[in-house]
Amino acid sequence: MADETRATSSTGAEGGGERPPSGDRSERRPPRAGGPGGPGGREGGRKYFRRKKVCKFCVEKIEAINYKDYRLLAQFVAESGKIVPRRLTGVCTPHQRRLSTAIKQARNIALLPFAGRAS
């Protein structure tokens, strides 16, 4: 009886040879983070180097962010009308706060849209 159980379980795990055994899923699973082929990595080469983003306002020494300067503010508003987050733009925290306030003021006097274009 024990032999019958082993025989059926071993043939059931094989699945006719079409799929790998349940313990070996490396072919179907994407590579893990940190290993070769992970985020920013290549199979046999160097890892991708992402340059640290610097604050545009600190570099250009812009202290006051004017709500009337809609061309500057439009760079930090996505097409959908949302304010682009700090991690994407690289703006420092104090300037991001002033920037969001200026964008909201510009929206209220109709210099910038509240929402993007409906398509």
Image (cartoon, rainbow, N blue to C red):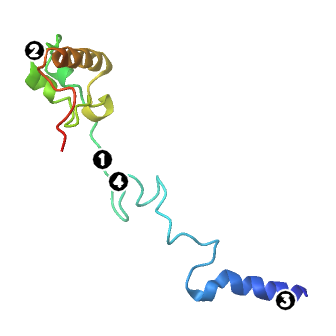
- To which quarter of the image does residue 88 belong? top left
Labels 2 and 1 touching (C-beta < 8 A)? no
Q: Nearer the viewer, residue 112 or 6?
A: 112
Q: Nearer the viewer, residue 41 or 81?
A: 81
Badge number at residue 57: none
Q: Which residue is mark 3?
A: 4
Residue farthest along the right direction in this orientation: 1
Nearest to viewer (mark 1 / mark 3)? 3
* Mark 1 crowd level (few <14, some 14–19, many ≥20, 10 Å Cα): few
Residue farthest along the front direction in this orientation: 118
Q: Which residue is mark 2?
A: 68
Badge number at residue 47: 4
Badge number at residue 49: 1
**Location of the C terminus (image quadrant):** top left
Q: Earlier in the sequence, mark 4 or mark 2?
A: 4
User: What whole-number distance in Å separates the C-alpha atoms at marks 1 and 4?
Assistant: 6 Å
Q: Position of residue 103 (x, y in %)?
A: 20, 19
